[in-house]
Image: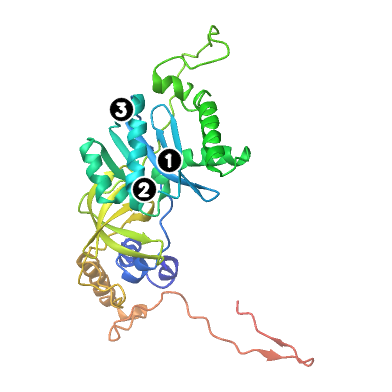
Amino acid sequence: MKETSRRYFWWPKITSQIDAIVKQCLGCSKYRRKPAAAPVCPWPFARRPMERVHIDYAEYKGKNILIMIDAYSKYIWAANMNADTTTFSTLVKLYEWFGECSGYPTTLVSDNGRQFASKEFQQKMEHWNIKHLFSPPYHPASNGLAEKAVHIVKDKLKKNEVSPQPLQLRIGLAQLLRIYRLTVHSATGETPYELHRKATSPSLFPNLQLRRSDVTVATPVPKCKTFEVGESVLVYDKMTKLSTVGKVLSKISNSSYSVLIKGVTKHIAIDNMSKTVIKDNSTNSDDNVDDSISVSSEADSDIESVISDFSDVDDSIGFQQHTGVIPSLRPVVPVVPPKKTRSGRTYRLKIV
């Protein structure tokens, strides 16, 4: 668009004015592609066991397995719930895990499953003084630690060909959890058992002391996209494949915001958000896009001033002032009709 315009016209700030027109186009904004994936924004580093836990359900051969992982120690809990995934059964199993030796966590992160979003679950979290956070809908990466734990459990069960029978599945879970908890984790350099229990993990060589490196390599933290409260944003809907203008209400986490869209407050991940100059106007309909796009007053004044300057130029240059059109400054090349030879071929005369 900009290159085509420069072939025929030019005036000061033509590029910025074309960009301003495109950014204010409602149709272009509505049907634009999904924003580029945002860099992975890690959760804040946990400094102690049970500071933050992530939970999720996994399906294995028709059985539902409740899985929980500690963000600090990477310690995993898993239990076969069969087909009973109700809120009551989930709370009972969580209470058993919390009452073992770890105590209640400070923060619990889950997806938007019915058992986690129920009123009974919320009341129990408040009673236990636990801060409950939800991951954005259709964005499992926000609860990535739980998804990783689900992958570990299901992968080990499949590789060991554990039967879905209740007794065999229970034994298989106990065996793989024991091996996992006593294995050094690549992210921490310690076993999950040692970090979570604050004790030396059981080993076949209890008197053997491992040499540990004192050198710590700092991992660069990628910069996340940020949005200000009250800022207008474009929200991409994965279901309709369309983008809608919304207004940022509050920041929920480093990777998600609360956005007001058409009078409805929604939890949106930053992967589906992008900045825009279009203001959120609830009176405009998304289905009816106005073909006439208003340009900013500054752009209008600049264009009018340039046209008036061109209109004052002497007619000897070749401008037609009465039409109000700025003609091209390129020389006019006459069109030469093709000629035929005796053989019937056509050729054009080359103008030098």
Judging by the rendered image, the residue that carries numbered circle 3 is 103
Residue nearest the viewer, comparing 6 with 323 = 6
Left or right, 42 with respect to 292, comes to right
Tell me which label, 3 or 1, sits earlier in the chain.
Answer: 3
Classify mark 2: helix, strand or loop.
loop
Label 3, label 1: how far apart the Cα atoms are: 19 Å
Give x and y (percent) for residue 119: 24, 50
The residue under label 2 is which amino acid type? Asp
- Label 3 vs label 1, nearer the camera: 3
Residue drawn where x is 24% and y is 74% of the image: 308
- Label 3 vs label 2, nearer the camera: 3
Task: Tell me the tag on residue 146.
Answer: 1
Left or right, 50 with respect to 229, comes to right
Give x and y (percent) for residue 252: 27, 45
Classify mark 3: helix, strand or loop.
loop
Tell me which label, 2 or 1, sits earlier in the chain.
Answer: 2
